[in-house]
Amino acid sequence: MIGPVLIVEDQPAEAQALYELLSWSRRPAVVAPDLRTARQRLLELRPTVIVLDLNLPDGDGLAWLRELRARPFGWSLTILVVSGRTDPDHIAEALLSGADDYVTKPYAPQELLARIAVAERLVALRAGFRWLAAFRPALPAHGRYPSAGILVLRPSDSRSSQHLLPEWARWAHGLRQENGLLLPIPDGSLLALFPSVARALDALRRALHGAAPWRAVLHIGSVSVGWLESPGLAAGAMFGEAVEEALRLAYLLPAGLWVITDPAYAALPAPPTARPWPPAAELTGLPAWELLRGNF
C-alpha cells in the first residue's frame, strides 16, 4: 500500500471498528468524521485509498466524490464507497461518479479487507503507469527479480511532479550509474530497482548528497517488472509485496530520515552505521534501521 487509508465516516462506532480492522491488518489509517476534516486530512496526509461513507453531517459524499475526480490529482486516488444504501440505481450512480468499488453495510470484515487489498493494487497500477517519457528507463521485458535492491525516495513537501522535474533530472544520472532501473511516480517519489542492496546504497550516497529534506527507504525482495508504451508516453511498473512494503514505509518517514529495512541491512557485506528505528516495526510490521548520515 502507498499512503494511509482515509476513513470518512460520521458514525463513531463504525469508524472505530474499521480503524481497528485496518490496524489489525497492519495498515496505517486515519478517521475523518465529516467532509471538512476529510478535506484537511487529504491535504495533510496525501492518502491514496479513501473509504467513503456517503451520508455525512456537513455534505453529500457523492458530491465530494465527483469533486475529487474533477481535480488534477483525483484519479491518483482509489475510492471505496461503504454505504447502507443497497438499491441498484444508487450503487450505479456512485460507480459512474467515480467510485472504484462499492460495499454495502453491514459488511463482512474479510470481504472489506479483500476489497481494500484490491484498492491498494489499483493504487500501485496507477502510480506505475503514469510517468513522463523523459525519464523512461531501458525497461526489460516482463520479468521477475527474486532479490532486487529497492530504493524509494520521497520529497518532504507536496510539490507536483512537474515542479520536481529538475531534481529528478539531477538525480537520474547518479541512480543509473549504479545500474538502477528508475521509475518516477506522480506523487513526487522516485522508485529505483538495483541488482543488489549494496548498489542501491551506493546510488543513495551518490544521488542524495546534500539533499537533506528527502526521505529514503532501502529494501530488498522479489519484484516483477512490466512496461507499456503509447504515443508520447512510456510507462513502466514494478510490482510485488516488497515494492508495496517499501512504498508504505516511505510514506511514514519524517522529512530527512533515511532507513534501511532489516532484511536489506542483513544482506549488506559491510553495513553502514545505523540505529534501530522503532516506528517502522510498530506501524508497518517491517523492522528498519535509521542510517546515520554523519557516518554514512
Image (cartoon, helix red, strand yellow):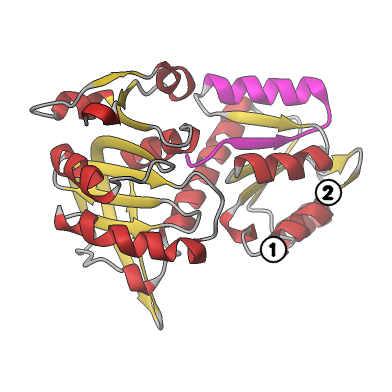
**Percent of width and height locating residue 282:** 46, 17
Based on the picture, tell me whether residue 177 belongs to the magenta stretch.
Answer: no
Which residue is pictured at 26% across the width and 66% down the height?
Answer: 137
- Per the rendered image, the range of residues in magenta is 1-24
Q: Which residue is mark 2?
A: 87
Mark nearest the camera among 1 and 2 is 1
Q: Label 1: how many residues lie within 10 Å, few (<14), some (14-19) or many (20+)?
A: few
> Which quadrant would the C terminus be assigned to in this image?
top left
Work out which residue is located at the far left of the displayed protein and give it: 269
Please indicate whether residue 17 sits to the left or right of residue 265 in the image. right
Instruction: Identify the mark nearer the N-term, 1 or 2.
Output: 1
**Along the line of sight, which residue is nearer the eye, 63 or 296?**
296
The image quarter containing residue 30 is top right
**Percent of width and height locating residue 224:** 27, 50
Q: Which residue is mark 1?
A: 71
Dot 1 falls on a residue whose secondary structure is: loop
Residue 92 appearing in the image: no
**Along the line of sight, which residue is nearer the eye, 48 or 208?**
208
Which residue is pictured at 58% across the width and 26% down the height?
Answer: 22
Dot 2 falls on a residue whose secondary structure is: loop
Work out which residue is located at the far bottom of the displayed protein and give it: 231
Which residue is pictured at 50% across the width and 54% down the height?
Answer: 187
